[in-house]
Amino acid sequence: MNELAIKDLLYKLADDELILGHRNSEWTGFGPILEEDIAFSSMAQDKIGHSLAFYTLLNELGEADPDTVAFTRNAEQFHNSQLVELPNGEYDFSLIRHFLYDNAEIVRFEMLSRSSYEPIAKVATKLKGEVKYHVLHANTWIKNLGASTEEAILRLQSSLNEALPYALGMFEPSKYEQELIDAGVYEGEEAVKAEWLKRIQAVLEKTDLKLPDLESIEPKFGGRYGQHTEHLQPLLDEMAEVFKIDPTAEW
Amino acid sequence: MYGGGNVFEATKFDTLQNEDPVKMAEFEARIERGEKIEPNDWMPELYRKQLIRMIEQHAHSEIIGSLPEGTWITRAPGFRRKLAQMAKVQDEVGHAQLLYSAAETLGKSREQMLTDLINGKSKYSNVFNYPAFTWADSNIISWLIDAGAIVNQLANAKGSYGPYCRALDRICAEEAFHLKYGHDAVVHMATGSAKQREMIQAALNRWWTPIMHFFGPPDKMSTHTEILMKWKVKMASNDDMRQQFLDMYVPKIWELGLTLPDPNLKKNAETGKWDYTEPDWEEFKRVINGDGPCNAERLAVRRTAEERGAWVRRALLNPKSKYVKPLA
């Protein structure tokens, strides 16, 4: 198996989880109700833990240690989708992003748990059990708020419209896409997207929210190749602020 | 974390005289026997009022207390600290949730408590009105403020109100981990590079006065709390708790080669107690009355969170469909 293809996949998975975990953690102390504050913090911990698991696999393939990889790279070296780096916005945007992201992540993890590449299969099998709860959380809240007040529905609809081009950006194919599919690492992004679409539609149908016609939306690609919005570098600077005081120190 | 029962109201004996003497005697006898008072049991109004006040302040201290340390979640250096800092602060928010529920058993709703917090009617621990300038400040809070909180909470867990005691038992178990985490982080700083040592010493110097303030004014300056001690609402005097803290932690601080900014701090061989310079109690009063370095900022953050989240709470109260089974 082409190691570069595996590394590319691992970076994509790890960076998505790290950056979204970081964003989720920004809700600590600011949630609309205490229970949501706590929920977002839980998911943040899980996601950052997942990123650590993938960075550890990368380390085993010869990349630098997880702290160095996570805390010292620049935005152009990150492979996350642009969706996860966008600021939290209001709770409606964070909730919609969480819904769109985790419904894709669970599909990807389910596929990866059957991967021909055993180290990823093992990790994905373990982690999908956690993502299951993230999906349950997102779907519950979307069903709940998506069929409540007009105000809530308007907010969520507008956030859904805003987030969708970025959500489609999650499925940007890697340059090793066909190779990964042929080698049985996973079924590839098109397959993830098709299954994702079925799942989000099933939830949205139970609400007053409308899924816009995806064909008419131009996906925000580039993230997988290091092209990011202006929001990623400040996030990384903040994340590394203390670490970079002395990268050789033990904190 | 918690700021100590140091803002009790003066006992108004008039209110006590209106209570049924037979029920009062029975109530006091139960407490004397070490029984717990439960939500539906008879209790004097003053007891209810002081407990609501104390538990509510404790809950507020947890959510406001999550702010100075929360600032450092996104900047924690390395995975190990980042994950631990997140879990630690999440615990504090969880404590607020537990405590608001405990206070609600006495008849005041969470919404009302949060409204009183935002309006400045209800207090929270003074220490959180000080800024956490650096990562090292966050470490000092995790270690020493949580240590102070444990001294306070272990005492209060033996109090008379059942729901509060049970919440405190759970909280103390988690705080014990925070203490280990905070201590570990401080040890790394204190035994690390010159820069790290300088950072942690500076943070300790900044936090010493708030830490000394943490247990409340000296007993000789405090409101009379005899009846509250008798009812096991307040379980230890401010000075006793401060002494216990100094006894447990000053040696540990010195052991790390750190110094404390009080030349008079020493254990008195004759009395067996710690001598120290009284911290500025005028500053304490000023800060608790709203004029500290971060009071306005902390409340503004809380107010913003409440306002921005209001639509979510409205939506939750107005579902279009009624579910007969849980969604998840």
Image (tube, coloured by chain):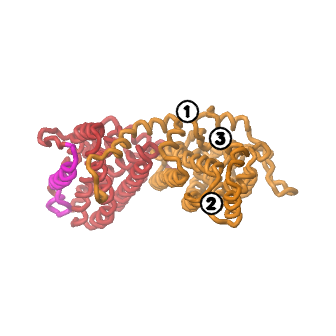
Chain colours: A red, B orange
Are the numbered discs 2 and 1 placed on the same chain, yes or no? yes
The residue lying furthest to the right in this view is B270
Q: Are marks 2 and 1 in contact (CB under 8 Å)?
A: no
The quadrant of the rendering that contains the C terminus of chain B is bottom left
Tell me the crowding category of disc 3: few under 14, some 14 to 19, or many 20 or more residues within 10 angstroms, Cα based. Answer: some
| Secondary structure category for the residue under label 1 | helix
User: For the residues carrying marks 2 and 3, which lies nearer the camera in this image?
Assistant: 2
Is residue A160 or residue A35 the one in the foreground? A35
Question: At which x and y percent is residue A65?
Answer: 41, 56
Position of B165 with respect to A215 (left or right) is right
* Amino acid beneath label 2: Ala
Classed neighbour count for the residue bearing mark 1: other residues with Cα under 10 Å, few (<14), some (14–19), many (≥20): few
Q: Amino acid at mark 3?
A: Arg
Chain containing the residue with disc 3: B
Q: Please determine whether, in this image, residue A11 is positioned above or below residue B32.
A: above
The disc at residue A216 is none
Q: What's the CA distance linking mark 2 and mark 1?
A: 31 Å
Q: Which residue is mark 2?
A: B157
Alpha carbon separation for disc pair 2 and 3: 30 Å
**Res. B230 in view:** yes
Q: Residue at x 47, y 44 (%)?
A: A29
Question: On what subunit does the disc labeled 2 rest?
Answer: B
Answer yes or no: is residue B255 visible. no
Return the residue at label 1. B296
Please state the extent of the stretch shown in magenta in the rendering. A180-209
Disc 3: which residue: B206
Q: Residue at x 48, y 49 (%)?
A: B77
Q: Earlier in the sequence, mark 2 or mark 3?
A: 2
